[in-house]
Each structure stands twice: as structure tokens, then as C-alpha cells.
Amino acid sequence: MFVLFLCGTPSPFSDEPVDLTTTGTTVRKSITIPVEMSYALAVTFEFPSDEARLNDQIVGSTYAQSCMGLVSPDDIPELERIRYEDRPDMERRLLGLPIPFHVVVRKATDHSVIVDHTFESLCTTGWSEKTKYRDIAWLQLPSGYYIAEVTNLHGQPDLTGVKTTLALSGIQRK
């Protein structure tokens, strides 16, 4: 009999403000990774009202399995890969706009690089009254002390008035 338990671990960081309206905005955090596992790097968009969330065209209103960082684009067969620009207009509106982030994670002790990658966040992974959520990436991190840097590579001026925050959270599958 196979049983799957999901155990939450303390978030290395959460509710860290990030300005996504400006290109090049960087969040730097010293973090402690208590347990080696995959950690979800996610962004939260808090709109001024439920109506503003519903009218949003940036974050999107739907998701696909690949949006949750569980499927690498390289794992999708080439014939099934569709560039964002080649998708039908209706599908692009539902997915929202791609938002690229450059993520660097370095060991705090010697500054050696553990992660140095550009990820493209696309489509929502959830929502509530005035809020939408997006995954940026799932990062496999060994336990230790690190410095994490997340840089917004393309400003989204249409997000003016939307409170945006980053979080890094771990979920352990047993």
C-alpha cells in the first residue's frame, strides 16, 4: 500500500515585497534551508479589489500542469511544445503574460553558485478574493545557509497598484 503524506516545512521567506512594475528590481534574502527538498518560489498578486483581479490581463485566469513547475519544458515532446507567441489569442489571454525572473542562489559561506537560471512565470496557480498566485520555479536545495536573489527581468507597468510579494516554501513528499 502506497501512502503519500505532504509535510510543510517553515518557509525560508514569505511575503517579501517585490516591485514588478520596474525592470531590474531585485530581492536579496539570506535564507536557511532546514531540510533538503524542492522549494517552490512563487509570486502573489494582491489586487485592490475582486473586480480588478477579474479584469487582470497580466497574471492570467487559468493554469496548465507546466505552470506549476512540475513539468520542465524540456520534458514536453517537441511536437507538443507551442511558443507563447504561436498560441491562439484566447489561450494567451487565459494564460496571462510571461514574466521572466533571474534566480541566483549562492552558499552564504563561500558564495559558490547553487542555482543561476532564468525562469519564465506563466499562468496562475490559484486565486482567492483579491489575490492570484503564480509559481516561478521549483528549486531543489540542500540544507544550509544561502543568499537568494530574484530579479524581475521585464517590468509590468499595468501592475501599478497591485501589491506583489515573493515566497519560498518547501513541501516534503514522504
Image (tube, rainbow, N blue to C red):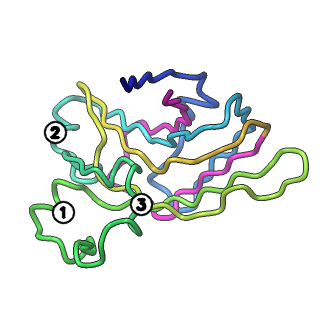
Q: CA distance from mark 2 to mark 3?
A: 29 Å
Identify the mark nearer the N-term, 2 or 3: 2
The residue that appears at 41% across and 45% down in the rendered structure is: 135
Query: Left or right: where does residue 91 sit relative to residue 42?
Result: left
Kindly state the secondary structure of the residue where label 3 is placed: loop
Q: Residues within 10 Å of mark 3 (few under 14, many from 20)?
A: few
Vertically, is 84 above or below 42? below
Closer to us: mark 2 or mark 3? Answer: 3
Closer to us: mark 1 or mark 2? Answer: 1
Identify the mark nearer the N-term, 3 or 1: 3
Q: Which mark is residue 92?
A: 1
Residue 151 magenta-highlighted? yes
Residue reaching furthest to the front: 1
Query: Which kind of residue does numbered mark 1 sit on?
Result: Arg
Query: Which kind of residue does numbered mark 2 sit on?
Result: Leu
**Percent from the top left, x then y, of residue 124?**
29, 45
Q: How many marks?
A: 3
Give 138 or 159, whichever is nearer the viewer. Answer: 138
**Percent from the top left, x then y, of residue 141?**
66, 44
Q: Is the residue under label 2 in contact with that under label 1 (CB below 8 Å)?
A: no
What residue is pinned by disc 2? 54
* Residue range (magenta): 146-174
The residue that appears at 11% across and 70% down in the rendered structure is: 88
The residue that appears at 52% across and 39% down in the rendered structure is: 166
What residue is pinned by disc 3? 72
Residue reaching furthest to the right: 110
Query: Which kind of residue does numbered mark 3 sit on?
Result: Ser
Q: Quadrant of residue 25?
A: bottom right
Vertically, is 95 above or below 40? below
Residue 152 magenta-highlighted? yes
